[in-house]
Image (tube, rainbow, N blue to C red):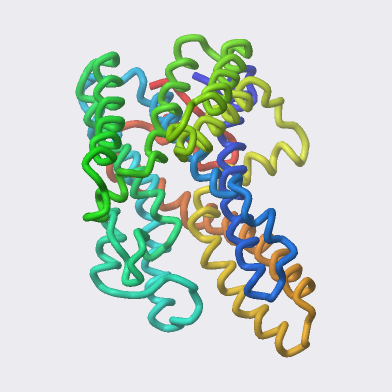
Amino acid sequence: MLVAGTGRGTRLNAIEAMRGVAACMVMIGHILDDATQFGFSGVAVPAAWPIWNAGVDLFFVISGFIMVWTFGDRFGSRGAVWDFVVRRLSRIAPLYWLITVLTAVIVVVWPGLFDRAQFAWSHLILSILFVPHLSPRGELLPIVGVGWTLNYEMMFYMIFAIGLLFRTGIGLVVISVAMVGAYVAVRILGSDNHPLGQFVANSVLLDFLVGVGLGQVVRQFGLKRTVLLVTAAAALLAALILPGSFGTMRFVKAGLPALAILSVALALYPTPTGRLGRWALLLGAASYALYLAHTLVINVIKAAMKDVALAFDLVPVLAFGLYAGLALVLSIVAALLLQKYVEVPMLRTCRCLGSSAPASALPSALPAVRLRRG
């Protein structure tokens, strides 16, 4: 057992901290994207940096790592598939469904609030079921825009669950072949004629596999700094030297650097002490709530700040600055409250109803990380 605050377990707090970093990367990118709506172009260059979108790739690498860490000993064991499915659905679905329904209601009542979200019953149902589809605007997005990543998570979970039917070696091969094979097949056959084809043709799904690989490295060699730093160096080297069309793949440009970042974090993450350490873990624990809810929060603040800017004739830089500051702070506050008073009770209820394993065996949704083998 590895528990926060005890040697090796403390270094695994890097996983929780990196979750918080990933969520903040995505949120900051979305806030910067809104600058032009206030007539301010001063952040156009940083807003276009790919680092913000790469937060998603970091999430996917972490996800692959966590699945191997928590279920690496259970390949081929009785009840593993059922336990895995219940755990992952209880972790992902309830809060997402709540935010999805809330967003749908707001879209109907206040249709001008969101830049892209539109309501249709089929759109809502397919979003809730994690089915990749085209929105009423013709985009490959669910009602909650950031939910497109959860469709990839569910695809990965489905394939991972199939892999759990076999012993470890065969199971990992099944998972790898299924994901790489699906991507390669769609790229060869073409993906333009169906939303599912467009969905699978995104190399971002390969991010999960390098996370799985990192999980296996840690299970085999432990948290040895040399091994982890060599892994990081190899990932960066591969991202730099892969030629031609390979070098333009999102997996290469963002997924491999995300692997390097996580490897370095696991190798060098210090013992979190003091206020900064506690906040890093607290934000990491609330990262899922922050990721799902921040677009709703910042759209409400954006609408209000546009009215304020117009009423007081604020210069664009000041209007955007006030919006950005409020959006950042209130998104984090909302996420912390949502995680404590909604997400955690939901998780406890779902696990009591459906899982035979103790909740502490799961990646924690609480501020102190508790990661266990098995």
- Which residue in the rendered view is the most extreme toward the front? 244
**In-front residue for pair 278/171:** 171
**In-front residue for pair 92/202:** 202
At a point 52% along the width and 67% down the height, the residue shown is 296
- Which residue in the rendered view is the most extreme toward the bottom? 311
Kindly tell me whether residue 49 is visible in this rendering. yes
Name the quadrant containing residue 45. bottom right
Kindly tell me whether residue 83 is visible in this rendering. no
Q: Is residue 199 above or below residue 168?
A: below
The quarter of the rendered structure image containing the C terminus is top left
Q: Is residue 319 above or below residue 184?
A: below
**In-front residue for pair 358/301:** 301
Name the quadrant containing residue 127. bottom left
Residue 317, percent from left and from top: 78, 71
Viewed as shown, does residue 225 lie left or right of 87?
right
Number of numbered discs visible in the structure rendering: 0
At a point 65% along the width and 56% down the height, the residue shown is 47
**In-front residue for pair 129/86:** 129
Residue 345, percent from left and from top: 44, 52
Residue 356, percent from left and from top: 29, 33
At a point 39% along the width and 56% down the height, the residue shown is 96
At a point 44% along the width and 27% down the height, the residue shown is 210
Residue 233, percent from left and from top: 60, 19
